[in-house]
Image: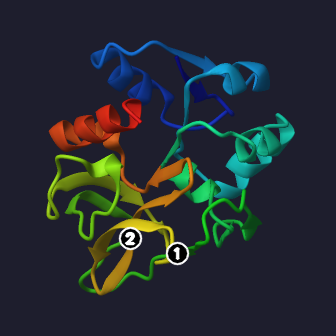
Amino acid sequence: MIAIIDYGCGNLLSVENALKRLECEYILTADPAEIIAADKVILPGVGNAAEAMANIREKGLAETIRGLRKPVLGICVGMQLMCLDSQEGDVECLGIFDAHVKKFEATADAKVPHMGWNSLGNLDSRLFRGLKSGSCVYFVHSYYADLCSDTIATCRHGDKLFSAALKYENFYGTQFHPEKSGSAGEAILKNFIGL
């Protein structure tokens, strides 16, 4: 059973549809007991990091998430929320990944938001089993996690190389949306389910 954390914002429907396609049993929940009882947990996210962290704290989920010892996958803002902090609303986050979240600076070569298909590099995790560097996935974001010791995949937007995915112990995060990333994203979700 996979628990999708429903904290009041996020791309819940697309994650649900992806798990249905993979014929996975899941629940949508904000109940700490159900989250703790699940085999795996997904923390999705679309929207503002400061508002998302406020919702997580209001629902009493911060310590629940930090205390999980099963595979956890943060997606997009969900990954950013597991970092140390975010410039989006100048908010302290969950502090799981040793990364700071910063805003992209728009340039002639790199519009903000970074939106569309882009390639992954430096893949270094079982999460990417069966994929090669250069595999393309779908991004929609204006903020990014900087490179750090937890980086397990990178991506370039203009001249900025950033963390496309992070891992610390049982926690994984993808800045991109695997549920919107075609066959590569499906492989990543299958690998997460198989952890």
Q: Residue at x 33, y 55 (%)?
A: 139
Q: Residue at x 32, y 13 (%)?
A: 23
Q: Amino acid at mark 2?
A: Val
Q: Position of residue 33 (x, y in %)?
A: 77, 21
* For residue 44, above or below residue 31: below
Name the image colouring.
Answer: rainbow
* For residue 61, above or below residue 34: below
Compared across the picture, whether 175 is left or right of 126 comes to right
Quadrant of the drawing holding the C terminus: top left
Give the number of the mark in front: 1 or 2.
Answer: 1
Residue under pointer 1: 103
Q: Position of residue 75 (x, y in %)?
A: 47, 46
> In the picture, residue 8 is in which quadrant?
top right
Q: Residues within 10 Å of mark 1 (few under 14, many from 20)?
A: some
Marks 1/2 in contact by CB < 8 Å: the verdict is yes
Under tag 2, what secondary structure?
A: loop
Q: Position of residue 194 (x, y in %)?
A: 36, 31
Q: Amino acid at mark 1?
A: Lys
- Sequence-first disc among 1 and 2: 1
Q: Position of residue 101 (x, y in %)?
A: 57, 71
Residue under pointer 2: 112
Mark pair 1, 2: CA separation: 9 Å
Q: Residue at x 71, y 66 (%)?
A: 89
Residue 74 versus residue 127: which sits nearer the camera? 127
> In the picture, residue 155 is in which quadrant?
bottom left
* For residue 121, above or below residue 41: below
> In the picture, residue 191 is in which quadrant?
top left
Compared across the picture, whether 171 is left or right of 194 comes to right
